[in-house]
Image: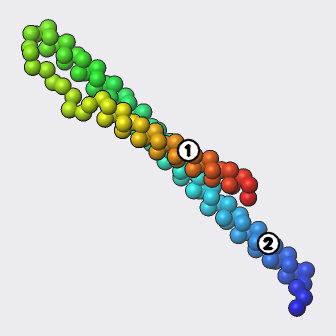
């Protein structure tokens, strides 16, 4: 069975089309991961800003209470160590997403 030149060209064009579709899937996946990593980073930044704001408000409440001679003060229910652990967990997730994006980009570039 001989394959004609026309059939060979068609097979090559089909293979190229399939490879382009696969590359598009990887590119889309990388874009999704990048968007998720960016969203996670923005969320972490908002959380850090909120924690700072709450810390400042808490300090102001303590100062007002001291000035008024009140002995009952509000104390945070969450220990700072827990907040640090949560931020560390988010950082690990962010690093994993960034690593996955870089791996996808590398794989895409080597296809």
Q: Is residue 57 left or right of residue 102?
A: left
At x 86% / y 78%, what residue is drawn?
Answer: 8
Rendered view: 7 above or below 68:
below
70 lies above or below 93 = above
Q: Name the residue under label 1.
A: 98
Mark 1 neighbour class, 10 Å CA radius: few under 14, some 14 to 19, many 20 or more: some
> Element under label 2?
helix
1 or 2: tag closer to the N-terminus: 2
Left or right of residue 14: residue 25? left
Q: Is residue 106 visible?
A: yes
Q: Quadrant of residue 81?
A: top left
Q: How far across and how far down the image is residue 21, in percent?
A: 67, 65
Q: In which quarter of the image is residue 52?
A: top left
Residue 104 pos. (x, y %): 63, 53
- Residue sitting at 47 percent across and 42 percent down? 92
Numbered circle sitting on residue 13: 2
């Amino acid at each position: 069975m001989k394959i004609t030149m026309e059939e060979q060209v068609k097979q090559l064009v089909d293979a190229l089309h399939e490879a382009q579709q696969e590359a598009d899937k990887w590119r889309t996946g990388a874009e999704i991961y990048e968007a998720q990593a960016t969203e996670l980073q923005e969320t972490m930044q908002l959380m850090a800003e909120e924690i700072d704001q709450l810390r400042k408000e808490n300090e102001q409440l303590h100062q007002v209470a001291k000035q008024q001679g009140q002995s009952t003060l509000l104390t945070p229910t969450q220990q700072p160590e827990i907040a640090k652990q949560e931020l560390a967990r988010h950082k690990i997730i962010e690093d994993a997403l960034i690593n996955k994006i870089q791996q996808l980009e590398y794989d895409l570039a080597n296809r």
